[in-house]
Amino acid sequence: MSRRLEIPAAIAVGELAVRARGIGVQLDGKRILEGVDLDLHAGEVLALIGPNGAGKSTLLGVLSGDAALTTGTVEIAGVPLGDWHLQVLARQRAVLAQSNAVAFPFSVAEIVEMGRAPWRRTPLEDDDERAVAEAMELTEVTRFAERAYPSLSGGERARASLARVLAQRTGIVMLDEPTAALDLKHQEAVLRIARERAAAGDAVVVVLHDLNLAAAYADRVALLADGRLHSAGAPEQVLTAETIAEVYQHPVEIVRHPRTGRAIVVPLRD
Ligand code: ADP
Ligand code: MG
């Protein structure tokens, strides 16, 4: 009973929120991930990038505890994943999966309220209404609150699912391609929210395909290629023309934003 009431302590900014070492995943005899070491700190936005099939979703699944690993260890706030009580883990990390298939016609409000389930029977249950309303405002889905989730467009569904994750109010946020279906305004909004959460001390890892979003918003970038961590570091260290051309197998040019100096990746075109 006492474990049910457990509320994870905040992780101090700069401290390790997630520590993964020697991560290997094999599925049906196929090597999906091998030897991946990755750190995620409280207070940072880490962008996870890499070509289709590189293993980004698998790695996010392993980091969150939703997918099994074959070798290696993952610690959340210094505690091995396997030692976490599932309900308590759900108060520490929230996950936006890549596919948000919902079979039943729940309303958007009901979907977002599901983010509060881990806090049931804790004192933080008192925040439910505010957390749900705030998350729906941030993702601009308030006006869809009573609509059936399956009736929304792909982008609207993605925002409603993100609202569920934000409403969970965890210190660690893991987002798998949250911007894939979104228009320009909402892509920027999602990354701005990620930055705000990091500024408030949360640890945010986000899978992105848009390298320019990664360059503009991430503190650090981790590049996966063929199941291995190719490189990790500041965006300007990882996002070089040589590296991108090699890993994505397409020539690119890196130009600098005239005001921010951030990298802009431009594919070379004939
Ligand atoms: P990413 O998110 O980087 O596009 P994924 O992590 O989804 O990549 O997948 C990595 C690789 O693992 C892909 O080649 C994919 O086809 C393969 N894969 C994923 N799930 C399975 C599975 N259940 N069985 C076999 N192969 C899988
Ligand atoms: Mg994926």
Image (tube, helix red, strand yellow):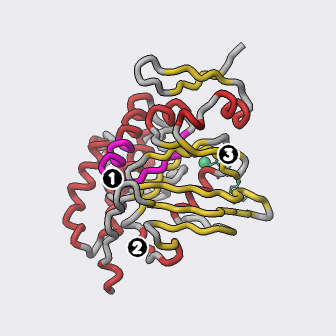
Quarter of the picture containing the N terminus is bottom left
Mark 3–mark 2 CB contact (< 8 Å): no
- Residue 201 tag number: 1
Under tag 3, what secondary structure? strand
Q: Nearer the viewer, residue 17 or 120?
A: 17
Q: Earlier in the sequence, mark 2 or mark 1?
A: 2
Residue drawn at x 76%, y 58% as measured from the top left: 31
Q: What whole-number distance in Å separates the C-alpha atoms at marks 3 and 1?
A: 27 Å
Is the residue indicated by label 2 positioned so its CB lies within 8 Å of ligand 1?
A: no
- Residue 230 tag number: 3
Q: Based on the displayed image, in which of its 4 quarters is residue 233 positioned? A: top right
Is the residue indicated by label 1 positioned so its CB lies within 8 Å of ligand 2?
A: no
Q: Amino acid at mark 1?
A: Gly
Q: What whole-number distance in Å separates the C-alpha atoms at marks 2 and 1?
A: 22 Å
Q: What is the crowding at mark 3: few (fewer than 14 residues within 10 Å), some, or many (at least 20)?
A: some
In the image, the segment drawn in magenta is 193-208
Q: Amino acid at mark 2?
A: Gln
Residue drawn at x 69%, y 57% as measured from the top left: 33
